[in-house]
Amino acid sequence: MDKYFKYTNSVIGLPLFFVLFLWFVYWLEIRFGFDFDTNGILPKTASGLQGIIFSPFIHSDIKHLYNNSVPLLALLAALQFFYAKQSFFIIVFGILFSGLITWVIGRESYHIGASGLIYVLVSFIFFKGLMTKYYRLVALSLTVIMLYGGMLWYVFPKVDDTISWEGHLAGLITGFVLSVIYKTPEYKKGIKYDWEKPDFDPIEDKFMQRFDENGNFVNLPPVVEEEIEEPEAHLSYYTPTFPVNYEVVLNKKNESKPES
């Protein structure tokens, strides 16, 4: 199963390109005095639908951009390494569906930033790792929740009026749904040992027989060898046939014997 964990250039290239593009967009805004905020998601308006695509690439200031860049680098690299086959679809549909949900439930304000995608990645990696039940992916899930578990508080309203909790909640929901939709058959655990089979009987297993009812290791009882009766030997004798006809010889001797 570990053969599916392969390091490729995209493991570093994809997150690095994505984050550099975010910084490039922010540089364009500062350098030429653009105001991209109005291209964000404006809920329940037709013009605000464009923000579903553009909002992840727009940030309000350098602090906002930096806070999103660091987790994006780590999470995109983890996604590309452990879920290479699904990564493209997770990113694309994660942006689209989280943006659409934000457009539906969001407040009447412009929602911008890549934090919605971050919540998609955290949610997908966490739930998908638990669903696979593969120990390395479960460990990845626990690592992600340990590092970014505090983000959960920001899916609730009234924590901070300047934060789009709607976008965070939309990303969390989208990541969970994608973890259910996209299957990972390459990580399906196969049966390798007899004790993993459904019809395994521990009583008949030679190894399990070395333990008593209290779980103590004991030796197997000595095997009693059954006595095998050997068949009786019968001797047969063979009398060779010589090429001499004794009867004829004796007759000849009798014929040559002189009478008395």
Image: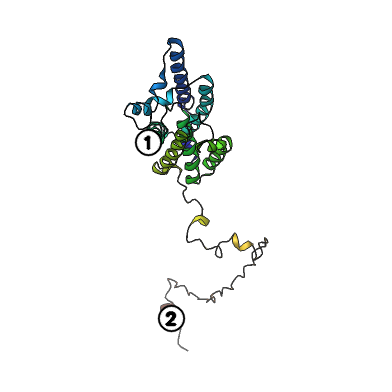
Residue lying farthest to the left in this orientation: 46
Q: Residue at x 47, y 59 (%)?
A: 198
Instruction: Identify the residue position indicated by label 2 in the image.
Output: 256
Provide residue 31's location: percent of width, then percent of height. 45, 10
Q: In this view of the protein, which residue sits in the foreground, 90 or 172? A: 172
User: In front of the other: label 1 or label 2?
Assistant: 1
Q: Residue at x 45, y 23 (%)?
A: 18
As helix, strand or loop, the secondary structure at mark 1 comes to: helix
**Mark 2 belongs to which amino acid?**
Ser
Instruction: Identify the residue position indicated by label 1 in the image.
Output: 104
Gap in angstroms between the C-alphas marked 1 and 2: 141 Å
For residue 245, above or below residue 194:
below
Q: Residues within 10 Å of mark 1 (few under 14, many from 20)?
A: some
As helix, strand or loop, the secondary structure at mark 2 comes to: helix
For residue 169, above or below residue 21:
below
Q: In this view of the protein, which residue sits in the foreground, 93 or 12? A: 93
- Residue 45: numbered disc: none
Residue lying farthest to the top in this orientation: 32
Q: How is the image coloured?
A: rainbow
Q: Is residue 47 visible?
A: yes
Provide residue 155's location: percent of width, then percent of height. 50, 37
**Mark 1 belongs to which amino acid?**
Val
For marks 1 and 2, the one nearer the N-term is: 1
Provide residue 210's location: percent of width, then percent of height. 63, 62
Provide residue 253's location: percent of width, then percent of height. 45, 80
